[in-house]
Image (tube, helix red, strand yellow):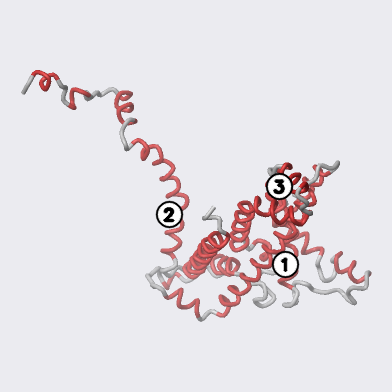
């Protein structure tokens, strides 16, 4: 061993062990474990708030849990709840109605929201106040909005029935929520009034971010308003459109508030949806195990929709 080798410090001599907390923290910050330590609090919070409730709900769907039937116990049932769903007529009706509720609701709300955003995307006097007024239905609590519309559409005292009769569009007052043919369209109309500002707000914000230079250049090239809308506005709004549609679909699938207030799933099962059925099973029949199975099905359907929709829209390629 030559003199050069003897003069080289050992690893321990290069970084002496210190009991000083600040020194230990400094040494740890230079290691590869520092990034994991920094994200550990966030991971713990996500697990506690998101992962654990989901896993707990999935586990509950495999067990018997009826608060009004303690004699049944809380035994493990396996896939019995899911097998029962296949033979449940109410579940099949709720699944069909959920599809109609989501497709009809999101399509109508997006269309009206886009039209309203295009109308408000102008630098005219009074339009700032109009933008605020358009947001009022969205910020109004669903309980208040639902009860207001229930009174307006009342078959005896409703102002809408009175106006339609005076205009000659109806010969007599109609019970809109008691007729299976009109119950779902009427609830969709109420949902349209309340929720289209959600699309208006976000789409308008996206339009405000599009440079006017693009439209001016298109005008120089001879583009008409439809060409500008088709080739400039829609492509640049595509990320916002994808996000808003996914969020609204999730909201409509999981929120039975308007349905509870206006129809409670009736008449019969004309307006019964999966979220409303799960709510009734859990808090009216106290069958939390069966309700959890429906909730798991809803979660799986939403996951499949989100993946398919995002991939079909081409957002992942961009």
Label 3: which secondary element: helix
Do callouts 2 and 1 mark residues in contact (Cβ within 8 Å)? Answer: no
Q: Is residue 149 left or right of residue 49?
A: right
| Vertical order, 215 against 114 (above or below) | above
Along the line of sight, the residue nearer the viewer: 196 or 143: 196
The residue identified by callout 1 is 187
Q: Residue at x 72, y 56 (%)?
A: 196
Residue at the front extreme of this rendering: 221
Q: Is residue 23 left or right of residue 312?
A: left
Q: Residue at x 40, y 68 (%)?
A: 74
Please identify, in this view, whether the residue under mark 2 or under mark 3 is nearer the observer: 3
Residue 161: x and y in percent read 86, 69
Sequence-first disc among 2 and 3: 2
- Mark 2–mark 1 distance (CA, rounded to whole Å): 35 Å
Can residue 144 be spotted in the picture?
no
Q: Residue 243 — which label?
A: none
Near mark 1 (Cα within 10 A), the count class, few <14, some 14-19 or many ≥20, is: many
Residue 283: x and y in percent read 56, 65
Along the line of sight, the residue nearer the viewer: 270 or 26: 26
Q: Residue 207 — which label?
A: 3
Sequence-first disc among 2 and 1: 2
Residue 72: x and y in percent read 42, 73
| Vertical order, 126 against 8 (above or below) | below
The residue identified by callout 2 is 52
| Vertical order, 3 against 168 (above or below) | above
């Amino acid at each position: 061993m030559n003199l050069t080798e003897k003069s080289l410090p050992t690893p321990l001599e290069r970084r002496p062990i210190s009991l000083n907390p600040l020194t230990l923290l400094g040494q740890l910050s230079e290691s590869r474990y520092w990034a994991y330590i920094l994200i550990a609090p966030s991971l713990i919070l996500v697990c506690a708030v998101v992962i654990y409730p989901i896993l707990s709900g999935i586990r509950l769907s495999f067990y018997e849990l009826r608060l009004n039937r303690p004699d049944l116990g809380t035994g493990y049932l396996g896939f019995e709840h899911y097998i029962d769903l296949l033979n449940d007529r109410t579940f099949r009706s709720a699944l069909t109605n959920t599809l109609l509720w989501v497709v009809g609701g999101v399509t109508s709300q997006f269309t009206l929201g886009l039209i309203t955003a295009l109308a408000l995307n102008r630098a005219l006097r009074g339009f700032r106040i109009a933008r605020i007024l358009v947001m009022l239905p969205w910020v109004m609590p669903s309980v208040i909005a639902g009860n207001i519309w229930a009174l307006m559409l009342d078959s005896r005292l409703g102002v809408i029935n009175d106006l339609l009769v005076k205009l000659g569009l109806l010969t007599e007052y109609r019970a809109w929520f008691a007729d299976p043919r009109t119950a779902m369209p009427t609830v969709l109309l109420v949902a349209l009034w309340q929720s289209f500002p959600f699309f208006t707000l976000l789409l308008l914000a996206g339009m405000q971010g599009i440079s006017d230079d693009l439209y001016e250049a298109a005008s120089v090239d001879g583009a008409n308003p439809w060409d500008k809308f088709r080739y400039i506005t829609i492509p640049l709004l595509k990320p916002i459109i994808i996000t808003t549609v996914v969020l609204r679909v999730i909201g409509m699938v999981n929120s039975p508030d308007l349905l509870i207030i206006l129809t409670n799933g009736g008449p019969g099962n004309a307006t019964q949806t999966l979220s409303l059925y799960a709510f009734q099973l859990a808090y009216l029949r106290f069958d939390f195990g069966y309700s959890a199975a429906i909730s798991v099905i809803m979660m799986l359907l939403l996951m499949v929709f989100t993946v398919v929709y995002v991939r079909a829209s081409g957002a992942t390629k961009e």
